[in-house]
Amino acid sequence: MPYRPGVLEQLLRHGVRPRNDTPPAHVQAFLNDLYRFELRRLRARLLAGEIAKRDYSSHVIRLRERYALLSLPVRFWLVDDTGAHSP
């Protein structure tokens, strides 16, 4: 089943290009791993003094916004069988 165009756009921003037969759960797990990696890197920057503690939460919020696709259940990542987009 093909991925929705908007989902593919968001995935491509992270360098992820799934094939139509790639299970969305695998793509979601990979994207989640990328997100967690970036969170750890952000925390390391905080601990190294590169980011002020008062600014850390805004960095986390921006990162969360970049990975907003993770908040969408994977069943909505695909075009349904009728060719219509899922809600």
Image (cartoon, rainbow, N blue to C red):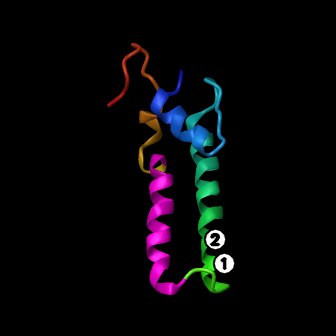
Name the residue located 64 percent from the left edge and 32 percent from the top edge.
Answer: 18
In this rendering, the answer to whether 1 lies above or below 41 is above
Q: Are marks 1 and 2 in contact (CB under 8 Å)?
A: yes
Residue 57 is covered by the magenta coloring: yes
In this rendering, the answer to whether 39 lies above or below 85 is below
Name the residue located 60 percent from the left edge and 38 percent from the top edge.
Answer: 12
Name the residue located 65 percent from the left edge and 34 percent from the top edge.
Answer: 17
**What is the distance, in whole Å, between disc 1 and disc 2 at their CAs?**
6 Å
- Quadrant of the rendering where the C terminus is positioned: top left
Instruction: Answer few, some or many: residues within 10 Å of disc 2's Cα (few below 14, many 20 plus, some between 14 and 19).
Output: few
Q: Is residue 44 left or right of residue 51?
A: right
**Residue 50, percent across and down?**
63, 81
**Judging from the image, what secondary structure is the residue with disc 2 in?**
helix
Q: Hey, what amino acid is under mark 1?
A: Ala
For disc 1, the marked residue is 44
Magenta segment, which residues? 52-69
In this rendering, the answer to whether 72 lies above or below 66 is above
Instruction: Answer few, some or many: residues within 10 Å of disc 1's Cα (few below 14, many 20 plus, some between 14 and 19).
Output: few
| Quarter assignment of residue 36 | bottom right
For disc 2, the marked residue is 40
